[in-house]
Image (cartoon, grey):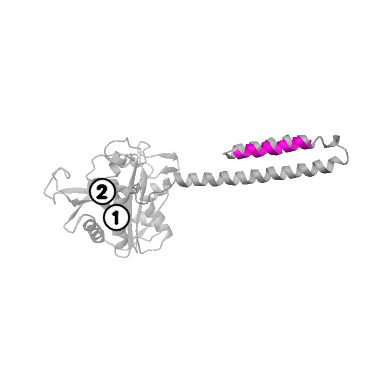
Amino acid sequence: MKTQLEKIRQNAKAALDSFETKEQVEEARIKYLGKKGELTAILKQMGKLSAEERPVIGQLANEIRADIEKKIALKSAEIKEKELEKKLREETIDVTMPGMPASIGSKHPLSIVLDEIKEIFMGMGFDIAEGPEVEYDYYNFEALNIPKDHPARDTQDTFYIDDNIVLRTQTSPMQIRFMESHEPPFRMIAPGRVFRSDAVDATHSPLFHQIEGLVVDKGVTMADLKGTLEAFAKRLYGENTKIRLRPHHFPFTEPSCEIDVSCFKCGGKGCPMCKGEGWIEILGGGMVHPKVLKNGGVDPNIYSGFAFGIGLERLVMFRFNIDDMRLLYENDLRFLQQF
């Protein structure tokens, strides 16, 4: 049995000296020291030995086990060190080589113009407000003086979730929500996404963006509306920009108007961008209807106000000379990287 044990020691040492991987070392451990290993098999025969031989063979078996375990530990450490050295050699970085350029994103054209608009109105003392995109019929229509039989409620134009809930068709519901939660005087704009059941083409989309504006105070007049929007237009398009107000109708303002700016490309002389008219329509507005003030909890006998709505996509298309609204939503990097 001594001879068998010494042979196991020699075979294990020779095998471990030749191994070069962790897997080979683990296989050797199982082969010689495992539950079904060669050393364990020898020890199971101890019962056949005499009382005098058992201590001697047991001590020798323990020495051989310890030798093999030590050899396995040393070999594992040696292999680990070699693997580390190899990894360091393969992953060496030449700091003198030029680096790989990192791909850096940029603002979307919608965000570029929206941030400019926010900055302009914040500079005039306006707050920024946000509201829900899934809106109650009351806030989207009824509270804005749009009765049940109004054409704007047509299911062909509005996404109805049920009879009482819609995807907001405009940011105007924020007029009511803001008046309900704030005491006048106040000034605010509410940018956000709106939804209408439009077919997708170069100038229409079922999803687009509006910027609602609302000012409520004592003695507010149309002159304040004109002055505010003129200051806005000059900041956005340059000091030589002029605006004009044309009569219009909105259920939630009275009187109402469409606001045009002098064409910033031709200076009002007439060009393809303004279709030869010298003017470009950019938004609508007017004095807040007394019923709307009352629905918002504001006494129309004490306070008055003006409101306006800006189509963000229209301003972006004019700013960057974009002729197809779909380009703003398709996420084509070839297009977006221009900005």
Toward the right, the furthest residue is 51
- Amino acid of disc 1: Ile
Q: How packed is label 1: few (under 14 Cα within 10 Å), some, or many (20 or more)?
A: many
Q: Is residue 57 above or below residue 176?
A: above
Q: Position of residue 9 (x, y in %)?
A: 70, 39
Q: Does the magenta stretch mainly form a helix, a strand or a loop?
A: helix
Front-most of residues 332 and 52: 52
Q: Which residues are magenta?
A: 1-17
Q: What's the distance in space between the residues labelled 2 and 1, CA to CA?
A: 10 Å
Give residue 97's position: percent from left, percent from top.
34, 49
Q: For the residue labelled by badge 1, is the local secondary structure a helix, a strand or a loop?
A: helix
Location of residue 185 in the rendering, given as x and y in whole percent from the top left corner = 36, 64
Task: Residue at 29%, 55% (x, y): give it.
Answer: 117
**On-image quarter of the N terminus:** top right
Mark 2 lies on residue: 315
Q: Residues within 10 Å of mark 2 (few under 14, many from 20)?
A: some
Between 176 and 4, the one nearer to me in the picture: 4
Which quadrant of the structure image shows residue 64? top right
Q: How many marks?
A: 2
